[in-house]
Image (cartoon, helix red, strand yellow):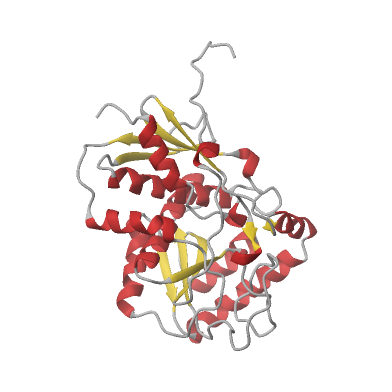
Amino acid sequence: MTGYDPNQLHQAAAAGIRAPSLHNSQPWLFRLHAGAIEVLLDPARTLRATDPDGWAAHIACGAAVLNARLALAAAGVPAETTLRPDRTEPGLMARLRPGPPRPATYAEESLYAAVPRRHSNRRPFWPTPVPADARAALAAAARAEGAWVELLVGMTALSGVVQIVDAADRVLRRDARYQAELSEWARTDDAPDGVPVRAAGPVAEPHDLLPQRGYGGRVRAPGRDYEPEPLVAVLGTAGDSPVDRLVAGQALQRLLLTATASGLATSMISQPIEVPATREKLRLALRTYGAPQMLVRIGYGQPGSPTPRRPVDDALAAPPRPEGEQS
């Protein structure tokens, strides 16, 4: 196959935009260039107060890359992917070139089918434990993309991490710029981005084990407290370079889609990653190497409300102009 075509670009982008992003900011663009599908960072949609060094934007773009890969594999035209292929263009996150055509595997079809169904469920989960085989599949999914995973089961494993998450959340609540940006992305209308009230978690209570972001959520129903011992996955990478973060985004999305395909609900906890001091405390508490990149709460629960997405065409970029061509 010589190159992808506009229809395949559209199919890859339609899946890519279903990736998660902090505050549902959707910081990605897709373009067709010389037969390759490229994923770019959209600088107009980055979070200046929340994500000053681009960590969350790279995670989101990595997740979008994984979705695009699955869409192309499901179409029988899998991609050979290069992350950060051109260091002279720092906004170019990944380049997907056609590999040898082949039928999609069962795993690829299953994960691709989960793409439109995956969403963050910020509501309380049921206390039903996640079985060991499902936990093993989640860890294997992230490791398949080059990340490491620590699964925290029970309060003995969770207690120290819960304190770190709470400390990070307190730091962020005292940051006026952070809180102003959070409010900017909380939606009460039908905007195509941000987090609408219907998709937010209920208003936090003092006895909650893990803090929730204040997107203007509803008061919880009586008896609908958060699960007392959630399963929490900590996902990380060997380093913390832009490429490591893109790897983490792909690994995160494979884990999330694996959970969705297994009937599990998920929500992400990134506060301790957003505060450098608590991120290092988390690494030390886990006694692991490398850089923690995301925490994920996993369990069984009632269906949540997905956040909206912009139309696919809004996320498509024109190919770059040839050198010397005038605008």
- Residue 7 percent location from the top left of the image: 37, 34
Image vertical order of residue 43 relative to residue 182, above or below: above
Image vertical order of residue 78 relative to residue 55, above or below: above
The structure residue drawn at horizontal position 37% and vertical position 59%, both measured from the top left corner, is 114
- Which residue is situated farthest in the left direction here? 102
Image vertical order of residue 260 relative to residue 125, above or below: above
- Which residue is situated farthest in the bottom direction here? 223
- Residue 155 percent location from the top left of the image: 51, 85
- Residue 50 percent location from the top left of the image: 67, 54
Q: Locate the N terminus and report the quarter of the image it occupies.
A: top left
* In this picture, residue 72 sits left or right of residue 244: left
Q: Quadrant of residue 207?
A: bottom right
Of 283 and 29, the residue lying toward us: 29
Q: Locate the C terminus and report the quarter of the image it occupies.
A: top right
- Which residue is situated farthest in the right direction here? 176
Of 87 and 128, the residue lying toward us: 128
Give the total of numbered labels. 0
Q: Quadrant of residue 8?
A: top left
* In this picture, residue 302 sits left or right of residue 79: right
* In this picture, residue 271 sits left or right of residue 170: left
Of 224 and 132, the residue lying toward us: 224
The structure residue drawn at horizontal position 45% and vertical position 71%, both measured from the top left corner, is 265
- Residue 189 percent location from the top left of the image: 68, 56
The structure residue drawn at horizontal position 39% and vertical position 65%, both measured from the top left corner, is 260
The structure residue drawn at horizontal position 51% and vertical position 55%, both measured from the top left corner, is 20
